[in-house]
């Protein structure tokens, strides 16, 4: 267990701490999951801790980051989504349109997630997308 804790700490310190916001971290963590097998892959973490420990650390961080966002207030989720979109460097409206049409946010849900939590998350993301769509960027600043 100590090795898993060390791998999680390493992942948090070296990678996740440098990503702006929980939603950006969730996108990153879900991108390390192979969509064919459901297994997580991270070469640097696997080199340091072994593939099995890296897999478990990524899964644990993915699940905990998802849980944090699941219980985030809508206003904060809107801010998180806005921060994520800015971090992509892509045109805001194109990202919003793609996320609405393609429902790209569904790949952010951990595989161990229960159906109710998954539905709550997708509903919250849809609301945040709609809030960003109808409000000009300047209106969202505090």
Image (cartoon, helix red, strand yellow):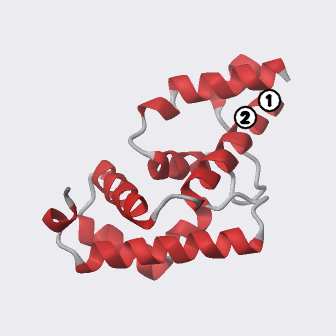
Residue designated by label 1 = 53
Residue 85 sits in which quadrant? bottom left
Q: Classify residue 106 as left or right of residue 135.
A: right
Q: Is residue 14 above or below residue 97?
A: above
Q: Nearer the viewer, residue 28 or 124?
A: 124
Label 1 near label 2: C-beta < 8 Å? Answer: yes
Q: Is residue 44 visible?
A: no
Residue appearing at x 71%, y 19% in the figure? 6
Mark 1 falls on what kind of element? helix
Q: Residue furthest right?
A: 1
Residue 3 visible in the current orientation:
yes
Name the spot of residue 122 as percent of width and height, x first: 56, 73
The quarter of the rendered structure image containing the N terminus is top right
Count neighbours of disc 2 (C-alpha within 10 A) and say few if under 14, some if 14 to 19, many if 20 or more. Answer: many
Question: Quarter of the image holding residue 53?
Answer: top right
Disc marking residue 57: 2
Q: Position of residue 68 (x, y in %)?
A: 58, 51
Q: Quadrant of residue 69?
A: bottom right
Q: Residues within 10 Å of mark 1 (few under 14, many from 20)?
A: many
Q: Report, in whole angstroms, how far the alpha carbon at label 2 lies from the one at label 1.
A: 6 Å
Relative side of 44 to 136, left or right: right
Residue 16 screen position, x and y as percent? 51, 34
Query: What quarter of the picture does the C terminus occupy?
Result: bottom left
């Amino acid at each position: 267990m100590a090795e898993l804790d060390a791998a999680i700490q390493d992942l948090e310190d070296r990678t996740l701490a440098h990503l702006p916001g929980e939603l950006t971290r969730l996108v990153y963590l879900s991108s390390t999951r192979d969509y064919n097998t459901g297994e997580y892959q991270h070469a640097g973490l696997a080199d340091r801790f072994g593939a099995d420990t890296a897999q478990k650390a990524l899964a644990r961080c993915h699940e905990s980051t998802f849980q944090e966002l699941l219980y985030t207030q809508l206003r904060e989720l809107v801010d998180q989504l806005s921060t994520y979109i800015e971090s992509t460097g892509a045109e805001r409206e194109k990202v919003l349109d793609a996320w609405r049409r393609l429902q790209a946010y569904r790949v952010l849900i951990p595989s161990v997630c229960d159906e109710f939590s998954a539905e709550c998350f997708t509903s919250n993301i849809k609301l945040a997308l709609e809030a960003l769509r109808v409000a000009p960027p300047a209106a969202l600043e505090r």
